[in-house]
Image (tube, grey):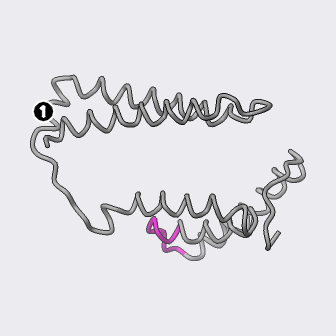
Amino acid sequence: MTRLMAERLVAIGMILAAGFMYTQTIDWPQRAGAFPQFAEVGIMLLAFGMLLRSLTARDKERLRGMVKFDFSYTAWKPVYIMLLGVIYSAAVFKVGFYATSFVFYFIAAYMTGLRDHKLILITAAILFPLLYAFFTLVLGAFLPEGILF
């Protein structure tokens, strides 16, 4: 398969997937679907732009050649991080938002290649109290609680 065809197929797939996800949030109560719908429309617009860009002469030249498959960890890292995000989403309801977010933050930082432990800890020391203050104290949001609060 050519790289140009792969680019177009990915764009069309993203438009279809985002359109499907948009339809799943239409009947959510009290505008709970506002953010997911916003995100899905954004994905559809970006994918449509990607599709249009693939029609230009510059992209036809840039995407010349065949698709080369790379099965290294670096090439698959985005997939692993997305899978971690799915696991995180499920764990939030079993373990609790704050405990799961704390663990997810450190694993995601390590997986993306951040190795400055001092910076990671300083960011966590600022991020998590702010998360708690914003969601609990300012918004009064009831975040998912699990076995670890």
Range shown magenta:
109-116
Tell me if residue 53 is in the magenta stretch.
no
- 63 or 119, which is in the foreground? 63
Location of residue 99 in the rendering, given as x and y in whole percent from the top left corner: 73, 70
**Image check: 9 left or right of 83?**
left
Query: How many marks do you count on the picture?
Result: 1
**Relative to residue 65, is residue 83 depicted above or below?**
below
Tag 1's secondary structure?
helix
The secondary structure making up most of the magenta span is loop
Identify the residue under disc 1.
Answer: 61
**Image check: 63 left or right of 131?**
left
**Relative to residue 142, is residue 103 depicted above or below?**
below
Q: In which quadrant of the rendered view does residue 23 lie?
A: top right
Q: In which quadrant of the rendered view does residue 95 lie?
A: bottom right
Three-letter code, disc 1: Glu
- 24 or 64, which is in the foreground? 24
- Residue occupying image coordinates x 46% and y 69%: 111
- 116 or 72, which is in the foreground? 72
**Image check: 118 left or right of 128?**
left
- Residue occupying image coordinates x 24% and y 28%: 54
- 96 or 49, which is in the foreground? 96
Tell me if residue 110 is in the magenta stretch.
yes
Location of residue 139 in the rendering, given as x and y in whole percent from the top left corner: 86, 45
- In the rendered image, the quadrant that contains the N terminus is top left
**Image check: 23 left or right of 113?**
right
- Crowd rating for badge 1 (residues with CA inside 10 Å; few <14, some 14–19, many 20+): few
- Residue occupying image coordinates x 85% and y 48%: 141
- Residue occupying image coordinates x 60% and y 75%: 118
Location of residue 11 in the rendering, given as x and y in whole percent from the top left corner: 34, 34
Location of residue 46 in the rendering, given as x and y in whole percent from the top left corner: 42, 30
